[in-house]
């Protein structure tokens, strides 16, 4: 008899298994051979198929039996109650995964994604990245490991970039520029934030943060068991009086902030705000953790910040003229190069650098040298600067398109500012809004949005949305805003 015959016998037994009892013996080979008019070899071939599929097991001298956990729709319910006692009380509750990290459920591409924190693939240097990864994979980096602090050439590139901004800085002096020895290469900014908070702040101690601020910093603070202390902030930056009060009252060792194109507000601090923050931190013996995530996404920041040299892609980092190690600088490539190239740099000096280095090494040992080599390849390629100029022009066009749609279809909402860089608009909605209902209603209509409450370390002072203008299909931004307006109208809220 052929394999087709053994296959038919196997199919017949699979049907029988649907009603069988766990541990029940299969009919004997003789019984099955008579039922199917087949030889014993054919029957044994069918049984071996079921054994290979994990549906039955043979017991020498006893027969063939149904495997208990393999029965379709009849799995044994595991008893996991013992873990309750073994694990004890749970740790502090971590924030839920934010909306910005959700993938679009509509795989057809018909939906409109305004929620994500990442640029669309069309805004990434695809050819540069693919070529860089190919070259890196062909070399020794594919089989080796990198030094704990990172590849020396990549560290030097990060240091040189920061040094290049010094001439445009607001502080004078003859401080030594940062060098490769000050740089730590880390696997993405999220990982780095945890190491920085543990090293500079410590569990149970206060960390000052802007309110609203980057949700990832709040996640890292929660995981590091530090206590976020909110400092009210808007499109101009932090409330300086409240920052001074918080530093004095809490004795906080560090202030986490995004001076350039803050996520979510788009705030870009003026030179005066930068200078005053520096003074306050120096007077109170505290660090600034400068998250410069949007360094590559400026398209007119100088004019917005009140500077005279309009047209600069972005104002210089505060770390560019840091002479006393006050600023711990975080520079990520994940959004501008590729989400697949999770490479970032921490630039710090003195004991602070050594503590952060010890924590990052204990956490990760080292960053993939293949990814580091690819990142360096992209950064030094002549096409990188050309790509950034193109991306900045496109981001400006996308921002204008989304701003126009909001102003024409949601005039009752308030754009807190028109950002001169970054990836997002920060929109305050008319009250009272049922945010969860708004998000679900928009999603049913094919539009993904991110509720603003996820960016606040404490209770939000109103209803907000963060709308990303770097996502796919910018020509559909007006359609997306009309869906949001309709969802608000369904709640009886004014949209015009």
Image (cartoon, helix red, strand yellow):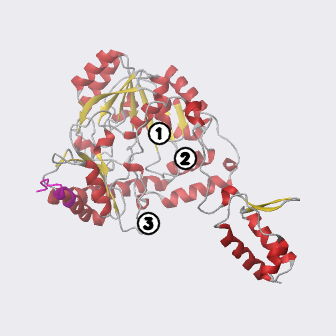
- Quadrant location, the C terminus: bottom left
Q: CA distance from mark 2 to mark 3?
A: 33 Å
Q: Nearer the viewer, mark 3 or mark 1?
A: 3
> What's the mark number on residue 255?
none
**In the rendering, at what x and y percent does residue 315 appear?**
32, 39
Q: Is residue 419 visible?
A: no
**Res 119 quadrant in image:** bottom left
Q: Secondary structure at mark 3?
A: loop
Q: How many numbered marks appear?
A: 3
Give the magenta part as a residue range.
Answer: 486-496
Q: CA distance from mark 3 to mark 1?
A: 27 Å
Q: Determine whether, in the image, residue 182 is placed left or right of residue 395.
A: right
Q: Is residue 74 visible?
A: yes
Q: Secondary structure at mark 1?
A: helix
494 magenta-colored: yes
Residue placed under numbered mark 1 in the picture: 190
**Res 58 quadrant in image:** bottom right
Q: Please determine whether, in this image, residue 473 is positioned above or below residue 322.
A: below
Residue placed under numbered mark 3 in the picture: 107
Q: Secondary structure at mark 2?
A: helix
Residue placed under numbered mark 2 in the picture: 376
Counting residues from the start of the chain, the first of labels 2 and 3 encountered is: 3
**In the rendering, at what x and y percent does residue 409 appear?**
16, 60
């Amino acid at each position: 008899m052929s394999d087709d015959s053994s296959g038919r016998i196997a199919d017949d037994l699979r049907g029988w298994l649907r009603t069988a009892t766990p541990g029940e013996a299969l009919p004997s080979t003789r019984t099955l051979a008579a039922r199917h008019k087949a030889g014993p070899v054919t029957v044994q071939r069918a049984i071996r198929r079921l054994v290979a599929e994990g549906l039955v097991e043979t017991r020498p001298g006893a027969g063939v039996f149904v495997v208990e956990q393999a029965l379709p729709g009849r799995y044994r319910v595991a008893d996991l109650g013992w873990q309750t006692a073994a694990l004890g009380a749970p740790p502090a509750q971590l924030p839920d995964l934010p909306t910005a990290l959700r993938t679009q459920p509509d795989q057809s591409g018909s939906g409109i994604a305004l929620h994500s924190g990442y640029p669309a693939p069309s805004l990434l240097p695809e050819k540069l990245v693919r070529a860089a990864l190919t070259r890196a994979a062909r070399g020794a980096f594919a089989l080796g490991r990198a030094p704990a602090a990172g590849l020396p050439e990549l560290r030097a590139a990060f240091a040189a970039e920061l040094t290049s901004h010094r001439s445009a800085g607001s502080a004078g002096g003859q401080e030594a520029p940062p060098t490769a020895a000050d740089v730590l290469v880390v696997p993405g900014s999220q990982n780095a934030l945890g190491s920085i908070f543990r090293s500079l702040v410590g569990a149970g101690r206060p960390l000052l943060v802007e309110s609203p601020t980057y949700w990832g910093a709040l996640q890292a603070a929660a995981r590091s068991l530090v206590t976020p202390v909110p400092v009210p902030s808007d499109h101009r930056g932090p409330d300086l009086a409240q920052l001074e009060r918080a530093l004095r009252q809490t004795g906080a060792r560090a202030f986490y902030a995004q001076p350039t194109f803050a996520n979510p507000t788009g705030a870009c601090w003026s030179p005066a705000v930068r200078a005053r923050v520096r003074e306050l931190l120096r007077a109170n013996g505290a660090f600034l953790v400068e998250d410069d995530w949007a360094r590559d996404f400026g398209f007119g920041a100088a004019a917005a910040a009140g500077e005279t040299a309009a047209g600069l892609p972005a104002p210089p980092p505060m770390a560019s003229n840091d002479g006393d190690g006050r600023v711990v600088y975080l520079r990520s490539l994940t959004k501008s190069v590729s989400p697949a190239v999770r490479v970032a740099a921490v630039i710090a000096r003195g004991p602070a650098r050594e503590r952060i280095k010890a924590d990052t090494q204990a956490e990760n040992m080292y960053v993939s040298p293949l990814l580091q080599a690819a990142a360096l390849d992209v950064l030094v390629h002549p096409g990188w600067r050309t790509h950034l100029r193109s991306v900045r022009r496109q981001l400006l066009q996308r921002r204008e398109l989304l701003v126009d749609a909001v102003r024409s279809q949601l005039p009752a909402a308030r754009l807190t500012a028109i950002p001169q860089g970054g990836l997002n608009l920060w929109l305050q909605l008319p009250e009272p809004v049922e945010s969860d209902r708004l998000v679900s209603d928009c999603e049913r209509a094919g539009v993904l949005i991110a509720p603003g409450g996820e960016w606040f370390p404490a209770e939000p002072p109103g209803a907000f949305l963060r709308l990303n203008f770097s996502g796919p299909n910018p020509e559909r931004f007006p359609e997306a805003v009309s869906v949001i307006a309709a969802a608000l109208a369904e709640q009886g809220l004014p949209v015009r």
